[in-house]
Each structure stands twice: as C-alpha cells, then as structure tokens.
Amino acid sequence: MAPTTVLLADDDDRFRSLVRSVLEDDGYVVVAESVDAGSTIAAAEAHRPDIVVLDLVMRGAEGLSTVRRLRADDPARPVLVLSSLVDPAVEREAASLGASYLDKTAGLDALEAAIEAAVAPAGSGSSAGP
C-alpha cells in the first residue's frame, strides 16, 4: 500500500517543522507545506494529497473558510483541522463541513491517530497505517 500523502498547512514554522519530522519518521509523505489560505488551496490542487492537516487560524483565512474551499474542490479528501482554539461550536461547524477537528495540545500520537482515522476507508474501523 502506498504511504499516506499529507499537505501540512500551518503558519507556525516551528510547529509545522516538528509535525513534518514526526510524520515522515512514521512513514507519511508530506507532499507540500503552506502558511496561508491561498497557498493551501493552491497546494491541495497541485499535489492532491490524501489528507490536508490544516491550522484553523492562518493568514488570509477567516475561521473555517479554507475548509469550505478545500471541501468544495474535493469533497472526498479528508481535512483535519488543528487548532489551539478550543471551541465546541467551531468543532461542530468543522464536523458539519466534513472535517475532523483536533486540539493542538492533544499531542503528536493523537494527531497521527486522527490522520489514520480520517484516511481509513469507510466502514473499515481502522487504518492500515501510513
């Protein structure tokens, strides 16, 4: 099975670098990184990753507007929203758009588990891993 490809979108360089390193060490392929809404949309269109891991608050985006644009472009592609903002209303809205939501403080193991769950085939209950 081919490794899971990831677009990593976060405007915090240190956080993005840490996440990339951990994901790549565990067999994921980070096909692109982006730092704002516009470059995220462009990278998703150009690279067609298996999943987009998206910071909720980035330059050029208001809340979940980037999720809406990503889902409009490819409704089947999973989007995992990461945020340090803990807001049940935002989490519900992300879910209504078909995106998963994870608090950034949940840890890297939780991030990998959320990615695996998001890319798992419907009805499988588990993932084959990266």
Image (cartoon, grey):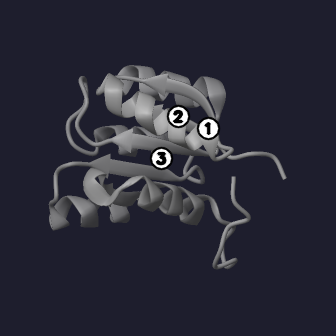
- What type is the residue that disc 3 sits on? Arg
Residue 81 circle label? none
In the picture provided, is 12 more to the left or to the right than 122? left
Please tell me whether mark 1 sits on a helix, a strand or a loop: helix
Front-most of residues 121 and 20: 20
Q: Position of residue 66 (x, y in %)?
A: 35, 37
- What type is the residue that disc 1 sits on? Glu
Q: Count residues near mark 1 (Cα–Cα under 10 Å), then give few for <14, some for 14-19, many for 20+.
A: some
Residue 21 circle label? 2
Residue, disc 1: 24
Asked if residue 67 is positioned above or below residue 11 in the image, the reply reads below
Residue drawn at 64 percent across, 79 percent down: 125
In the picture provided, is 95 more to the left or to the right than 6? left
Q: Count residues near mark 2 (Cα–Cα under 10 Å), then give few for <14, some for 14-19, many for 20+.
A: few
Q: Between disc 3 and disc 1, whose residue precedes?
A: 1
Q: Is residue 10 visible?
A: no
Residue, disc 3: 71
Please tell me whether mark 3 sits on a helix, a strand or a loop: helix
Please tell me whether mark 2 sits on a helix, a strand or a loop: helix
Residue drawn at 56 percent across, 66 percent down: 117
In the picture provided, is 63 more to the left or to the right than 69? left
